[in-house]
């Protein structure tokens, strides 16, 4: 029993020991397993680093979830948390865009009106890094062929400025377009979408105030994006009326971003014998030995439809692939809208000469809320509520090709005042409808129509042709049948307003009074817009062929001469003149003007009259007299430039013309035009005839005796057989000025002023002084000019001695001559 108990006790001890060992091993095993598990769990919890693409994808996804607006078009536009975003497709990186900033609304006194452009730039995006997009401005002033060696040097010398840098937030996972935040770019000031620095400086505007500026809305379309912003510019200097009152200027701006064609339209290289506005750059090539400026014209893209190409090239009239459309601002008073439309549609006759029918049209602005007049896809005639008496026709074009993308013609409300004044003083003698201050709607409508055509001509790319009226023989302007059939000028792009030559007895109808699109305009449109397909290898080959075409056409028809803008010395090219003989034409004009002036008190009469209309109309009549005078004065010191069918580029103004000009001055100015200032008018207007006539005389004496005139005559005498000798010219001029003063005290007073001016001007040539601004006349004074002037002064001294003997001692006239002799003595010897 005892052994059995002992055995049982030992078994219990082994069992307990076994249990303990098992528990210990289990614990050790559990402990090891725990360590392994912890180690394994620790390895699994370590985060895997994401790629930049993954991070941007997450950022893009987060923003998209918050976005409250999405609009698809050229760029996809998004809005989230009051921030605006563009998605830029990779296909548009490097593409060129026109960026046009227009006023949506403007304060009073800004000098710009709603609808007018305040900034125009060409821009493009550049991929700087995968995280950054640059926005650069494109400046196209130098070009070279990419296959030439010099191309690299040109490219290295024309780095385009970076105007903005955008952080790429992420990419659209489907389109891969890059998302950027554009809020601050449009909200704040920059050189692309705000006023230009020059404009801000002129108006004394500081940087836009951030707390009073906003990005209001963005709309996107297939080829453009329209951004509407509000900007407030503080100013302490009172640069505008609004700023003077409130110390700040607030404007609404519409920014149009329009993608340009991937492949530019082929340029048409400019020829100075046809008047087009141009773009230009300096052209470099390996073959040249000097640089050259290449200019190319601005024009709309007009092409036949694919199915009409053969018909077009065979000479048939076809409709263009894309018609030129101008919309009429709905703010335009309804009665003038049809006339503005007619003025646009009148250009179809010119486009038919280029092979296109229905090429251009005008339409009322549609009642479509999705359309905006600020949208750069639309050309518009904008009606501007302004006191400015004017209108203008600008163009916005592709800087690479000259293709006109759109035009916003500016039509100031008060232009009607200008045409009313012109028509009254120029046509009042031959058209009874012009003899009142408020024209009938039909008459004013026709005047609106002609101005519309002129400004749309500019919008189509045409410059002024101030030489066009020279093509019309003066007597044809009085030939009723001829002038009604042909018009009084060959171009509506001239400033040949109305037929002031026709006399009442000629019975010329309005058809022979108004300007119209003429043979020069049709030729210019034909030259600029005719499409040649693949006929020419490139623009250069085309230019060579078209240059021959111009030469041939000018030989056949001199009416096609382009006389320029009237800014050179050629008296055939002037503003506001008519015919090939302005002395004769203006003599006819003055005959009509005398009739108008005599009747102004009656024509301008108003109830409870304060004579404001009389004052304005008389001022306009005086201005017309001044224009006639200026036409004549341009002959002195002038020369003909670009004479058709002549090997000479420049020719002297014929001496016969200069003699006619002196005769005109003798008749119409040196005999004072007192008829221009009847007492019945000046007693009501307060006009000072003496001051105004003296001003006319001063202009005439300065132009006829200035160094430039005498130098040109002296040069011509050395180069031209039939020149006007300086000595003879001066004697002929003196004969018109140094006439006896006579017994009429009023006329004698004006003649004394005239003669005093004459001696004074000769003194300037004999004893010249340096100009106050340090500049010299572009035409350097001929060395003999002071000698000619001194020689002539001695002649005048002798003439005065003879005239003085005929005047009573002590009389005003005698004292006048004594004073002049004293002045002459001082001129001859200024030291004494």
Image (spheres, rainbow, N blue to C red):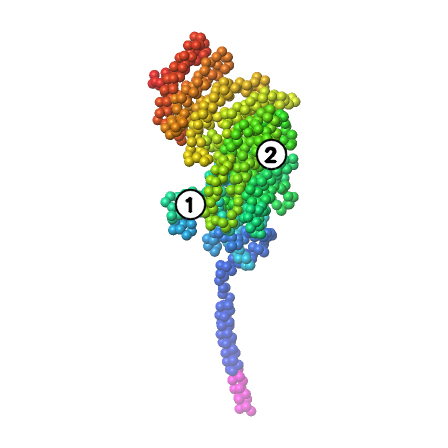
Q: Nearer the viewer, residue 579 or 104?
A: 579
* Number of other residues with Cα within 10 Å of mark 2, as a class: few under 14, some 14 to 19, many 20 or more: many
Q: Residue at x 63, y 27 (%)?
A: 433
Q: CA distance from mark 1 to mark 2?
A: 42 Å
Give the labeled residue for mark 2: 448
Which quadrant of the figure has residue 784?
Answer: top left
Label drawn at residue 634: none
Give the labeled residue for mark 1: 283
What span is in magenta?
A: 1-16
Q: Earlier in the sequence, mark 1 or mark 2?
A: 1
Is residue 726 visible in the rendered image? The answer is: yes
Q: Residue at x 52, y 80 (%)?
A: 22
Residue 512 coordinates in the image, percent (x, y)? 59, 31
Q: Residue at x 41, y 22 (%)?
A: 729
Residue 284 coordinates in the image, percent (x, y)? 40, 46
Q: Main secondary structure of the magenta part?
A: helix
Q: Nearer the viewer, residue 108 or 801?
A: 801
Residue 568 coordinates in the image, percent (x, y)? 45, 32
Q: Is residue 831 above or below residue 345?
A: above
Is residue 724 on the magenta stretch? Answer: no
């Amino acid at each position: 029993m005892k052994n059995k108990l002992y055995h049982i006790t030992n078994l219990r001890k082994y069992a307990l020991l076994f249990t303990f060992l098992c528990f210990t091993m289990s614990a050790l095993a559990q402990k090891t397993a725990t360590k392994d598990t912890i180690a394994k769990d620790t390895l699994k919890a370590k985060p895997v680093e994401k790629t930049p693409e993954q991070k941007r994808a997450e950022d893009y996804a987060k923003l998209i979830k918050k976005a409250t607006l999405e609009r698809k078009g050229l760029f996809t536009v998004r809005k989230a948390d009051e921030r605006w975003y563009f998605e830029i497709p990779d296909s548009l990186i490097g593409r060129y865009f026109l960026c046009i900033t227009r006023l949506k609304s403007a304060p009073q006194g800004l000098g710009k009106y709603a609808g007018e452009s305040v900034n125009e730039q060409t821009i493009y995006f550049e991929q700087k890094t995968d995280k950054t997009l640059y926005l650069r401005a494109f400046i196209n002033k130098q070009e070279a062929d990419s296959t030439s060696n010099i191309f690299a040097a040109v490219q290295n010398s024309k780095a385009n400025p970076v105007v903005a840098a955008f952080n790429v937030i992420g990419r659209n996972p489907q389109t891969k377009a890059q998302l950027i935040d554009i809020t601050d770019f449009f909200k704040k000031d920059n050189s692309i979408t705000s006023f230009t620095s020059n404009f801000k400086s002129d108006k004394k505007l500081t940087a836009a105030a951030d707390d009073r500026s906003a990005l209001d809305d963005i709309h996107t379309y297939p080829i453009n994006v329209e951004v509407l912003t509000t900007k407030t510019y503080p100013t302490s200097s009172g640069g505008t009326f609004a700023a003077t009152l409130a110390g700040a200027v607030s404007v609404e701006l519409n920014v149009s971003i329009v993608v340009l064609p991937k492949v530019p339209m082929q340029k048409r290289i400019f020829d100075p014998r046809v008047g087009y506005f141009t773009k230009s750059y300096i052209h470099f090539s390996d073959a040249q030995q000097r640089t050259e400026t290449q200019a190319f014209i601005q024009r709309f893209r007009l092409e036949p439809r694919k199915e009409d190409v053969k018909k077009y090239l065979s000479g048939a009239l076809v409709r263009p692939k894309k018609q030129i459309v101008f919309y009429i601002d709905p703010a335009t008073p309804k009665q003038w809208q049809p006339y503005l439309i007619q003025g646009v549609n009148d250009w179809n006759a010119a486009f038919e000469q280029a092979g296109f029918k229905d090429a251009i049209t005008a339409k009322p602005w549609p009642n479509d809320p999705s359309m905006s007049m600020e949208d750069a896809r639309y050309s518009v005639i904008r009606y501007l509520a302004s006191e400015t008496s004017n209108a203008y026709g600008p163009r916005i074009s592709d800087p690479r090709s000259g293709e006109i993308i759109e035009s916003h013609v500016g039509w100031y409300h008060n232009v009607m005042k200008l045409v009313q004044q012109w028509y009254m003083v120029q046509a009042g003698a031959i058209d009874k409808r012009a003899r009142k201050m408020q024209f009938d709607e039909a008459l004013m409508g026709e005047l609106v129509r002609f101005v519309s055509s002129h400004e749309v001509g500019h919008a189509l790319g045409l410059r002024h042709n101030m030489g066009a009226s020279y093509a019309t023989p003066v007597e044809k302007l009085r030939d009723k049948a001829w002038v009604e059939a042909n018009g009084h000028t060959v171009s509506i792009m001239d400033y040949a307003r109305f037929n002031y030559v026709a006399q009442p007895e000629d019975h010329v109808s309005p058809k022979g009074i108004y300007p119209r699109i003429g043979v020069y305009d049709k030729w210019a449109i034909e030259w600029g817009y005719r499409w040649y397909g693949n006929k020419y290898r490139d623009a250069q080959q085309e230019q060579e062929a078209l240059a021959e075409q111009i030469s041939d056409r000018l030989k056949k028809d001199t009416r096609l001469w382009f006389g320029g803008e009237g800014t050179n010395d050629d008296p055939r090219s002037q503003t506001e003149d008519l015919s090939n003989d302005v002395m004769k034409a203006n003599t006819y004009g003055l005959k009509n003007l005398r009739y108008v002036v005599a009747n102004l008190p009656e024509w301008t009469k108003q109830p409870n009259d304060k004579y404001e209309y009389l004052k304005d109309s008389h001022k306009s009549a005086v201005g017309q007299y001044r224009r006639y005078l200026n036409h004549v004065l341009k002959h002195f010191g002038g020369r003909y430039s670009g004479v058709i069918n002549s090997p000479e580029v420049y020719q002297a103004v014929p001496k016969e013309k200069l003699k006619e000009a002196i005769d005109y001055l003798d008749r119409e100015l040196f005999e004072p035009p007192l008829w221009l200032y009847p007492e019945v008018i000046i007693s009501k207007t307060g006009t000072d005839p003496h001051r105004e006539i003296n001003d006319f005389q001063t202009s005439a004496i300065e132009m006829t005796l200035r160094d430039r005139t005498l130098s040109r005559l002296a040069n011509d005498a050395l180069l031209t057989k039939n020149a006007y000798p300086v000595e003879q010219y001066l004697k002929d001029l003196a004969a018109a000025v140094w006439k006896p003063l006579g017994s009429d005290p009023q006329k004698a007073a004006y003649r004394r002023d005239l003669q005093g001016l004459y001696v004074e001007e000769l003194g300037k040539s004999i004893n010249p002084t340096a100009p106050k601004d340090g500049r010299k006349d572009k035409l350097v004074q001929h060395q003999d000019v002071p000698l000619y002037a001194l020689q002539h002064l001695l002649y005048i001294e002798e003439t005065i001695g003879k005239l003085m003997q005929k005047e009573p001692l002590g009389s005003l006239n005698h004292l006048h001559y004594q004073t002049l002799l004293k002045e002459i003595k001082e001129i001859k010897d200024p030291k004494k």
